[in-house]
Image: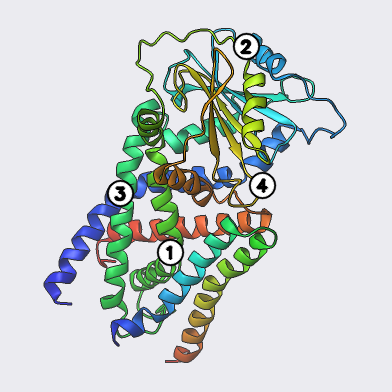
Amino acid sequence: MKAVQIFAFPALCAALTLAGLVLALVMDGGGDAAATLLLLVPPLIAAIANYRFRTLTKGR
Amino acid sequence: MTPQTIRRWSVLHRWSSLLCTLFMLLLCVTGLPLIFREEIDRALTGTGTVAAATPARSLEEVVATGSTLQPDRVVQFIVWEPETPGQITLSMAATATAYPSDNISVLLDAATGEPVAGGDAGIMELVLKLHGQLLLGPAGPPLLGLIAIAFLLSLLSGIVLYAPFMRRLPFGAVRRDRGVQVRRLDWHNLLGIVTAAWLLVVGGTGWINAWGGYIFQIWQVTAMAPTPPDAVIRPPLVSAGAALQTALAALPGHAPAIIAMPGSLMSDPGHYAIYLRGGSALESRLMRAVLVDTQNGVVASVPDIPWYITGLLLSQPLHFGDYGGLALKLLWAALDLVAIAVLWTGLRLWWRGRGVA
């Protein structure tokens, strides 16, 4: 696997996290909720990827 | 990446991590209650906000109460926290020019001027001193700054090492059939890379906060007259309350945040430095300063806030995660627990000595 592929999901997680942190800081009204949602996505992506890996390798 | 390069990054990752891990574990554990400081303080003091109709006491009366409670100390800072609109915090030091690391906070009800029950030097202040100074006084923040550098090096080298370790594995892989050590390594890599951006922000802002005192000293030298250690502070002829009203008139639409008394770290010997918050989310974090002469009550200047002070002011909410509602704080706490897991798995990997993360 190339580095670009390896870092695709981590880069997405990082971008979402940074966007969430900045939103909560600068946005009036609703920034807090939007930021919380954005920050929740990276752990969800990781959980789904981990679940997918577990189901794919089950029984091997 | 050649094997030799990987080995070099591994050495950097191992040693930078070892330098900071135990301190970082302490900081993560003490940081956890600090996320909920406002809620814990409220629960401990049992106070709410003051009814809007209640007339606030004059600032002089409130300061006088603080001086009565701590007769051996002088007020260095008067602080209004936006989360507790009915309260004023007096930060009190041994002398007017002392470095504020050993300050005592006295929490007063703005309406009655009475001390808030349990609001002085409570458990949270101790936790904050442990987190922000390691209970080492002025020597603590520079040490924490060095620990933060080691942590950031550890993070960056960990990100670099993620690629060679994951080149044959999909994102999210945790191999459960290869023994405890491999499973631990995979969890360490997964949790570390998913929270890398958050860890970089919290670590980076922690590093900036560690130098906060020095950053304000730089500004003091450039924007104000620095206070020599043996400076004699002339007794103000103008009260802090009157100076505050002058500053509020100079910057309409702002609310009081901090009054730095003459001679303190955030002011100079001849002026009150009055820091005001704006109305919007961003402006409420980027304070503006008004210097009011202590002898004639005239606005001496409204200095522009330089970029490094802006960075410091923004780094504080980003570090503690206390700038949002309860949902964001809970998420911050969950990320803090993940950080503890990353540190702990890294430590166990090294202790066992079989895998190199």
- Identify which amino acid the numbered label 3 is placed on: Ile
Is residue B303 toward the left or the right of residue B14 in the image?
A: right
* Residue under numbered circle 4: B279
Q: Which amino acid does label 4 sit on?
A: Gly
Q: Foreground: B312 or B209?
A: B312
Q: Earlier in the sequence, mark 4 or mark 3?
A: 3
Q: In the image shown, does A34 or B284 lie closer to the viewer?
A: B284
The amino acid type, in three-letter code, at marker 1 is Ala
In three-dimensional space, the C-alpha distance between marks 4 and 1, rounded to whole angstroms, equals: 29 Å
Check chain identity for marks 1 and 2: say if they share one: yes
Q: In which quarter of the image is the C terminus of chain A?
A: bottom left
Q: Nearer the viewer, residue A12 or B192?
A: A12
Specify the subunit that label 2 lies on. B
Circles 1 and 3 on the same chain: yes
- Element marked by disc 3: helix
Sort mark 3 into few (<14), some (14-19) or many (20+) by Cα contacts within 10 Å.
some
Q: Which chain carries label 1?
A: B
